[in-house]
Image (tube, rainbow, N blue to C red):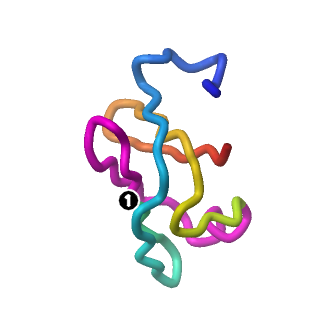
Amino acid sequence: MSIQAINVRNQFKGRIREIIRGDVVSEIDVETPWGIVTSVITTRSVDDLQLIVGSEVVALVKSTEVSIAKL
């Protein structure tokens, strides 16, 4: 799966390896074939997307920002 509106070069499919939860923001480590991609997103988004270790996701990279889309 790829997100159509985003350049495919900026998408890294992988699985969540670790989630470090904070009160407001959480750190998500995504293991991809090219290495680990880390995203810092709101803890509310982690809960809304029901992200857990092992979830298959796409890391969307834009400049210094990495977003997560659940597959």
Q: For the point 34% across and 53% down, which residue is it?
A: 38
Q: For the point 61% across and 44% down, which residue is it?
A: 69
**56 versus 4 height, above or below:** below
Give the position of the C terminus as an image quadrant: top right
Give residue 65's position: percent from left, percent from top.
39, 42
- Does the stretch in magenta take in 32? yes
Give residue 6's position: percent from left, percent from top.
56, 20
Identify the main secondary structure in magenta: strand
Give the position of the N terminus as an image quadrant: top right
Q: Residue under circle 1? A: 29
Give residue 57's position: percent from left, percent from top.
56, 46
The segment highlighted magenta reads 29-48
Give the image quarter of residue 40.
bottom left
Q: Farthest residue toward the bottom?
A: 23
Callout 1 secondary element:
strand
Give residue 46's position: percent from left, percent from top.
61, 66
On screen, residue 49 versus residue 53, left or right, reads: right
Q: Is 3 or 52 nearer to us in this picture? A: 52
Which residue type does callout 1 highlight?
Asp
Residue count near mark 1 (Cα–Cα under 10 Å), binned few <14, some 14–19, many ≥20: many
Q: Farthest residue toward the right?
A: 48
Q: For the point 48% across and 52% down, which residue is it?
A: 15
Q: For the point 40% across and 69% down, which residue is it?
A: 18
Give the image quarter of residue 4.
top right
Disc tally is 1
**13 versus 36 height, above or below:** above
- Does the stretch in magenta take in 44? yes
**32 versus 53 height, above or below:** above
On screen, residue 49 versus residue 57, left or right, reads: right
Q: Is 15 or 19 nearer to us in this picture? A: 15
